[in-house]
Amino acid sequence: MSRKSQVVTTLTERFGDQEEQEKFARRLGLIGATNIGLGAMLGGGIYVISGAAAGMIGPSLILAYLITGLLTVFTAINYAELACSIPKQGGGYTFAHDTFGGFPAFLTGWFLFIGNLVACGLYSLAVAHTLAVFIPGATEATVGQIAVIIIAITFITNIISIRGVSGVLGILNIFQSIVLFSFILFGLFFVSPTNLDPFFKPGIGLFEFMGAVSFIYISFVGFELITTASEEIKEPARNIPRAILLTLIIATIIYMAAALIIVGVVHYTTVADTFTPIADVYGVMFGPGAFYFALAGMAASNYAALNATFLATARVVYSMSRDRYFPTVLEGVNKRLKTPIPALILTFFIVSAFAISGNVNFVASLSDFGYLVGLSIVNASVIMLREKGLSVPGTFKARFYPAIPVLGVITCLLLVPTLHVETLYLGGVLSFVGFIIYLIYSRPKMKRYQRELKERALQEGVTWPVKPQ
């Protein structure tokens, strides 16, 4: 690390993040970190939106999951490298903050914040729809009320302890894995080749196929959530890269296999309009009992995804507050529980609003927009990390630099135009709103904070090496 970077790091530790290491406890190992990633990945994507995705492109959904997994590899590798050199709360936002700073950092946090919030709404709605099956005469209002109750339970769980969240995810992952693996294992005996022919839905071109890839992208964001809890993972330089790659590989294989069963056991048009495709196909194979068994797996899966994403969202809020982009009241961490309660409260209220009013397909697509834009900046952060000499020697480094970060940026940005036009419109509005918030509130407050750091540095006799962002 360069002398300039060392001085900046020292100032940050002394004045910007005092007692930071005392706020959070490192309680998660490799298995716990992987549980967070898998808890988010094996949720809404395959259990909820895979049916709609099959309706878009037919049996080629199997290939779409493979392509999405391969495209995501670049971002996953970049995340692993960034997490080793910047093992702090906030994940992608923190990476952009410590490398770019200023507006790019705010924009990254803003879009990842939106992506996570909307994803939480999607997962809570998925669980609510599952439970509503057992309530006679359930209406949309009933589903919304159930979703809010589920979010409240998630909120309480996250307040108690991150270890508790990881434990919940571990149990739910075991159950959902039983459902998924049994679905795949038994489903192989029911696959009919006629349902896979033609492999590509008639009239589907490359643009439409890539539109499906961008639509299911939300299923692959779970690995990113691992890094948002970096300060709570043991041996982060060793465990975070392994957890990220394990999560991505395991989930991609499961997605492809489950997609084969979904479009192989029944014709893809059968599941095109359902948000319970696995349960429906399981019911076709073994009857009503299997349908309800798969519904239970869907509920467990999406609740696990909700827990993991809820945790990550609160950590992004905490980190942006710590850096003065959001109000400082949101950076409070309970000394006994070691959890960011104010950030969790804000997350609870906003996610509840999405859950009450969300449309599953639109919510999933909007979440994709937030993730794709935010992650494109995160990928570029690797270049800034190396150019500024911020990489920590002896930690994970991607080969073929700068090819991997450049490909990560390109793969994210190429998928954005393939999203639904309504998503792009609302995404543009949210971008404008974020820009206004940054100009009116975040930028002035952050500059004042930088001036305070400079004054305190001068009092300590340390030369301030850079201009405020």
Image (spheres, rainbow, N blue to C red):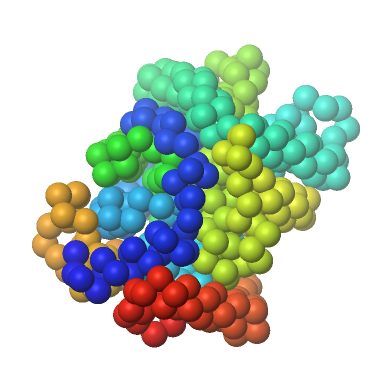
Residue at 33%, 56% (x, y): give it: 86
Q: Can you give x and y, in whole percent of width and height, for residue 312 in the image?
A: 53, 48
Answer above or below: position of 145 versus 64: above
Name, please, the residue furthest toward the right.
137
Residue at 42%, 61% (x, y): give it: 14
Locate the C terminus and report the quarter of the image it occupies.
bottom left
Q: Nearer the viewer, residue 180 or 234?
A: 234
Residue at 78%, 36% (x, y): give it: 149
Determine whether, in the image, residue 196 is placed left or right of residue 324. Answer: left
Query: Can you see residue 277?
Result: no
Q: Which quarter of the figure has residue 436? A: bottom right
Answer above or below: position of 452 versus 280: below
Q: Can you give x and y, in whole percent of width and height, for residue 152 in the image?
A: 74, 38
Q: Can you give x and y, in whole percent of width and height, for residue 21 in the image?
A: 44, 46
Q: Nearer the viewer, residue 175 or 275?
A: 175
Q: Which quarter of the figure has residue 235? A: top left
Determine whether, in the image, residue 259 is placed left or right of residue 319. Answer: left
Answer above or below: position of 52 versus 386: above
Q: Nearer the viewer, residue 352 or 348?
A: 348
Answer above or below: position of 117 versus 147: below
Residue at 68%, 51% (x, y): give it: 342
Locate the N terminus and report the quarter of the image it occupies.
bottom left
Query: Can you see residue 392?
Result: yes
Q: Can you give x and y, in whole percent of width and height, for residue 134 in the image?
A: 78, 25
